[in-house]
Image (cartoon, rainbow, N blue to C red):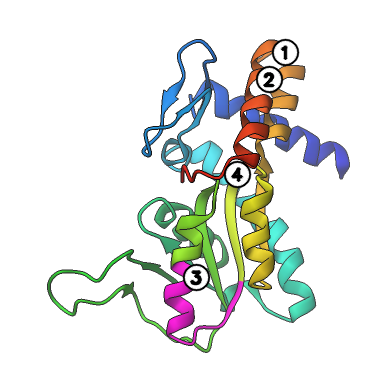
Amino acid sequence: MQNQENNRLQSIIDLFFTEEIIKVDASSPFVLSSGAKAPIYLDHRRAFTSPKLRKLLVQAWAEELELKFKPLNIRPQNVVCVGTATAGIAPAMALAVHWDAPFLYVRQKPKGHGLQQMVEGAFDPGRPHLVVDDMLTTGQSLLKTVEILKQLDTRIVCATTVTSHGLKPAHRKFESLNLPCVSLLQTQQILSVAQDMGLISQADLRTVMSWIENLSTASDSID
């Protein structure tokens, strides 16, 4: 079983690089939406347009989440997969399809026409809800969605992302809400395996890890 999991992890990480989901460039950093610069960029939208990678990711991710649901006596088919707008929509839908479960997404502000609602989809707040995003950096996108759902008295059992930089301030925010936040993969884990596979250099690994450490202690939000 452990060998199978290791092989699957290596397959996922290999596809992350060959399909250019992850790009590492210490000499020419990527500009994030906030204007901050980073030596690494993860394009999760490309991950969910790839059938092979999507299948591997969702299978591993679903198994990880099911371990969280089991002590709560929650069947995955009964969990409402809630995507953040817009990055969490594709991953939330992928999990919902895998489990044959309900799906909806939450806007960051009310729609300017029609029903002017923030929650898009058939909404039953009493059901267990899983809030889904692609990446955990500061967690602001997830936390905003959680806040909106809580205002509607929604039962939220977990938040989740495909990947996480593992920043301590972000995790403390979820701990303060007594809300589990599960990420399938950590950046350090991905890059360590990638370096072992010869996909990145040891120098690039050190650069990204140093950037993450500095980011973890910084007060500025880049999410």
Residue 92: where, in percent of width, then height?
Answer: 48, 59
Q: Looking at the image, is mark 4 or mark 2 earlier in the sequence?
A: 4
Q: Is residue 114 at all visible to an observer of this figure?
A: yes
Identify which residue is drawn at 74% across, 26% down. Answer: 193
Q: Nearer the viewer, mark 4 or mark 2?
A: 2
Mark 3 and mark 2: Cα distance apart in space: 33 Å
Task: Report the disc number at residue 202.
Answer: 1
Q: Is 51 in front, or is 165?
A: 165
Q: Looking at the image, is mark 3 or mark 2 earlier in the sequence?
A: 3
**How many C-alpha atoms fall within 10 Å of the one at disc 3: few (<14), some, or many (≥20)?**
many
Which image quadrant is residue 182 in?
bottom right
Mark 3 and mark 4: Cα distance apart in space: 18 Å
Horizontal side of residue 103 vs 169, given as left or right: left
Q: Looking at the image, is mark 3 or mark 4 earlier in the sequence?
A: 3
Q: Amino acid at mark 1?
A: Gln
Q: Amino acid at mark 2?
A: Leu
Mark 4 and mark 2: Cα distance apart in space: 17 Å
**How many C-alpha atoms fall within 10 Å of the one at disc 4: few (<14), some, or many (≥20)?**
many
**How many C-alpha atoms fall within 10 Å of the one at disc 1: few (<14), some, or many (≥20)?**
some
Mark 3 and mark 1: Cα distance apart in space: 38 Å
Q: Is 41 in front, or is 37?
A: 37
Q: Any magenta on residue 115?
A: no
Name the residue beneath numbered marker 3: 146
